[in-house]
Amino acid sequence: MARDLAIDLGTANTLVYAKGQGIVLNEPSVIALNMQTHDVLAMGHEAWQMIGRTPSYIQAVRPLRGGAITDFDITERMIRIILSRAGISRFNRPRVLICVPSAITSVEKRAVKEAARRAGATDAYLIDQPMAAAIGAGLPIGEPLGNMVVDVGGGTTETAVISLGGTVALQALRVGSFDMDTAISTFVRREYGIAIGERTAEEIKVAIGSAFATDDEVKAEVRGRDLMTGLPKTVILSPEEVRDALEEQVSAIVDSVVQCLGMAPPELAQDLIMEGVHLVGGGGMLRGLDQRIAKETQLPVHLVAAPLECVVLGAGKCIEAFESLRVMFMEADR
């Protein structure tokens, strides 16, 4: 008997939850291809290590951008590998529940379902990431109570107010942690004349990136290629510089939270004063982002215990009771 699977098919990372087992896969959403033979060379951590380090005929690519499929065939091959690593074969094809951003279109949703079916799933259902995140965070979404979730992913940021099992207010924008990485690399290129790669920009963000000033800030050494001479060069970046580089993306995220609060009914807005805002997603781990949102909204902001796994854990709770919640999934597909 095939196991039901929940898949958080993210722009940055892909996580798989197997019914009765928990999280069985957590890999970067990267696949390495030989462009001459079109063979898959690596997927996940191995492919991520290849970004920016391959010869011209080998490409390490992310087939999803902004939470949507940019290359259908490559995404299908990646999902096939994911199912294989989760212990699925053509003889025990599973049903899968896939977490998708609420910002994507109906056409993009159909593309995700079709890719999953062609990769080996007997059937594919969709659930919006904010709803899955709220379930994973253990919020009482079935009660007449306002629950607010801010999910900052690799390519999208979604803010939702949920009550009685439904989304009451939603604000989504295609800004995420990858846009922060791009902003850092653009800043270093403009201010210091140095080119750095995607991985280096991410390392800078994790090391000294922040959205709000803190007391224990340190500077970081950055190595890259001098655009004038073409030679390797090292510069020192301060947290203030990185914070300035990220200001546009952070402001957009905070503004979306404020706009979502403005869309919520007054009765639910009262609940949020007590319950606060719950921050999930890898981008939500940016140092000081919770303090920045709290300052702008005047609400308590809580970073959940497992921000990276929260969405797939919520979807996992759903598949543990797949039959009883089947109707909910069908409604989410429309």
Image (spheres, rainbow, N blue to C red):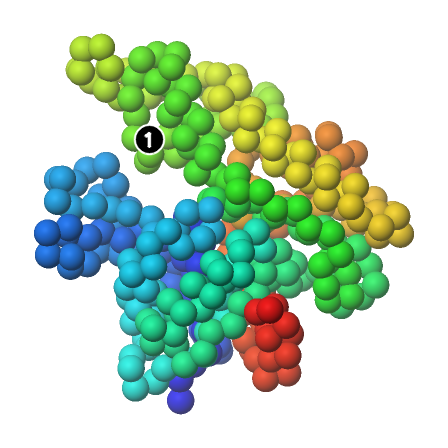
In this orientation, does residue 300 appear?
no
- View extreme (left): residue: 36
Position of 39 compared to 94: left or right? left
In this orientation, does residue 71 appear?
yes
Figure label count: 1
Q: Position of residue 293 (x, y in %)?
A: 68, 34
326 vs 318, nearest the viewer: 326
Q: Quadrant of residue 235?
A: top left
Q: Name the residue under label 1.
A: 200
Q: Where is residue 215 in the image (x, y as percent from the top left)?
A: 59, 21
Q: Where is residue 118 in the image (x, y as percent from the top left)?
A: 34, 73
- Which quarter of the figure is the C terminus placed in? bottom right
**Three-letter code, disc 1:** Thr
Position of 51 compared to 57: left or right? right
The residue shown at (22%, 51%) is 32
The residue shown at (24%, 46%) is 60
